Image (cartoon, helix red, strand yellow):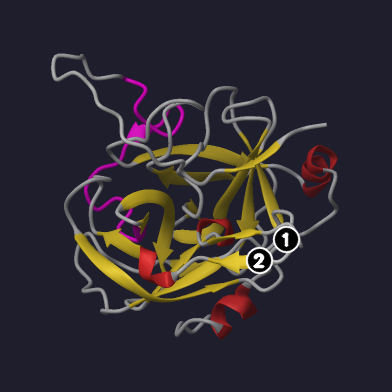
Amino acid sequence: MCKVFAIIALCFVVVTSTSAKPSNDMRILKGVDATIGQFPFIVSVIKEDLHICGGSILSNRYVLSAAHCVGHIDDNSKFILEDVKKYSIRAGSNERLCGGEIVEVAEIVANENYFHKLHDLSILRVKTPLVYSDTIKAIALDTTEVPAGTPVTIAGWGRQSPSGTLATKLQYTTEKVLPRSACNDVFILDTSDLYCLARPVNEGFCFGDSGGPAILVDKLVAVTGFVIDDCGSNEPDVSAKISTHLDWIRAHSDICII
């Protein structure tokens, strides 16, 4: 049976020698450095001063991320939300550790139907409205089904390898949407609420990329969810579909979805 892993960052401090050569693998697996302002809607979700997930700006007050980034399922199958006081976001920077602005989170709402990787969405309301600029902007939401075979762009600061360190600079790469039937065969779960994304082996998202965006023509189509077996395995990556969660997003934010 395939192992499924939510890809929240496991945070730790890594001490490196100042004489060490920079690694070419410090990225979403085989990703590319993003340019400044290329993804102005992406944020780093920070818990107790450490990056754990990505997120996307819905408006100057709300950010969309993954439910497993803000809580966990206990032994009684009940979702336990983390203390909101632990959370903040960094917006407006391609750097994980500096730049942009850090804003505290005032309220967190996780999807009430989140369980077993389904409906893996959360919304974070910030204490202070974000100030839009060339590097801080909201992203529009996709309201339609993305056809199989369509390439989508993912971005984040996730690990360079399953056991590696988080990326310092924002990374991005491309994956392709699989047919629903192929996704169900892999995940053994018949649902229309997920996208399975195909990519070459040893590429794709990894731990620390959770909650980040999958984008098509400047619209958010999915929220990064989990990997099967391990980062970059033979199995597809899996994300929460935006188009089937529009009512929930509308109910818990201030955006108008047309």
Residue annotated with mark 2: 79
At label 2, the amino acid type is Phe
**Residue 45 against residue 125 in the figure, above or below:** above
- In which quadrant of the rendered view does residue 245 lie? bottom right
Q: Which residues are magenta?
A: 24-43
Instruction: Pinpoint residue 238: horizontal percent, then vertical percent.
Output: 65, 45
Q: Secondary structure at mark 2?
A: strand
Can residue 68 be seen at all in this image of the molecule? yes
Which disc number belongs to residue 4? Answer: none
- The residue closer to the viewer here, 6 or 175, is 6
- In which quadrant of the rendered view does residue 43 lie? bottom left
**Left or right side of 15 for 192:** right
Residue annotated with mark 1: 115
Please tell me which residue is depicted at 48% across the width and 81% down the height of the picture: 253
**Left or right side of 190 for 40:** left
Instruction: Pinpoint residue 201: horizontal percent, then vertical percent.
Output: 60, 22
Sooner in the amino-acid sequence: mark 1 or mark 2 = 2
**Residue 170 against residue 39 in the figure, above or below:** above
- The residue closer to the viewer here, 248 or 159, is 159
At label 1, the amino acid type is Phe
Q: Secondary structure at mark 1?
A: loop
Instruction: Pinpoint residue 239: horizontal percent, then vertical percent.
Output: 62, 51
In the rendered image, residue 37 lying in the magenta stretch gets the answer yes
- The residue closer to the viewer here, 53 or 86, is 86
In the rendered image, residue 70 lying in the magenta stretch gets the answer no
Please tell me which residue is depicted at 70% across the width and 46% down the height of the picture: 148
Judged from this view, the residue extending furthest toward the front is 75
**Left or right side of 176 for 8:** left
